[in-house]
Image (cartoon, grey):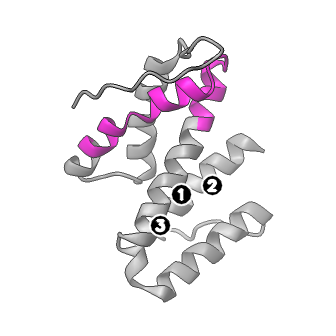
Amino acid sequence: MDSELPDIYCPFPQRTNPHVGHTRGHLATWIRQTGLVHRESAMLRFEQADFGAFVGMVYPTAGPEHLDLVADWFVWLFLVDDQLDDGHLGRSPELVRAVVERMRAVVDGSAPAPLPGEELPAAVIALMDLWERTT
């Protein structure tokens, strides 16, 4: 779907990060590895959102590693918000509470290591990766 943006006065030129293509590829791999997107229909919607291009316009001078990291944070925030509102997490206040407690534990450093065979929610898996790379 192509859309045309209206002309808006801007006193500086629009720039796009040259690493957008790399970041798009990184995001496609990262969201599959973390389990944030697993259905093909959801993947198509995700690709149409083009977070790589969005982040490339917001951070036109970032290097590829930093652009990937900030793109991962944006994606995590958007997808977790969707899961809490419209997804399976949002249907169970008890599950939301448990996931949010685990996320808090990741951020404050008190999260226990996953038990053998324990399946963590994708939101927590992704946050663990993000937090490690960020800190």
In the shown orientation, is residue 11 left or right of residue 99?
right
Q: Secondary structure at mark 3?
A: loop
Image quarter (top left, top right, bottom left or bottom right) of the N terminus: top left
What residue appears at the point 46 percent right and 70 percent down from the top-left corner? Answer: 84
Magenta range: 44-70
Q: Secondary structure at mark 2?
A: helix
Q: Main secondary structure of the magenta part?
A: helix
Q: Between marks 3 and 1, how big is the CA–CA gap?
A: 6 Å
Contact, mark 2 vs mark 1 (Cβ under 8 Å): yes
Label drawn at residue 121: 3
Residue 64's spot in the image, x, y percent?
Answer: 60, 20
Residue type, label 1? Ile
Relative to 73, is 22 above or below?
above
Residue type, label 3? Pro
Relative to 25, is 103 above or below?
below
In the shown orientation, is residue 95 left or right of residue 97?
left
Between 9 and 125, the one nearer to me in the picture = 9
What residue appears at the point 37 percent right and 82 percent down from the top-left corner? Answer: 91
Q: Secondary structure at mark 1?
A: helix
Label drawn at residue 125: 1
Residue 110's spot in the image, x, y percent?
Answer: 77, 69
Residue 53's spot in the image, x, y percent?
Answer: 45, 26
What residue appears at the point 70 percent right and 69 percent down from the top-left corner? Answer: 104
Residue type, label 2? Met
Contact, mark 3 vs mark 1 (Cβ under 8 Å): yes
Give the quarter of the image for residue 68: top right
Between 7 and 96, the one nearer to me in the picture = 7
Earlier residue among tags 2 and 3 = 3
Image quarter (top left, top right, bottom left or bottom right) of the C terminus: top right
Q: Between marks 2 and 3, how big is the CA–CA gap?
A: 11 Å
Residue denoted by label 2? 128
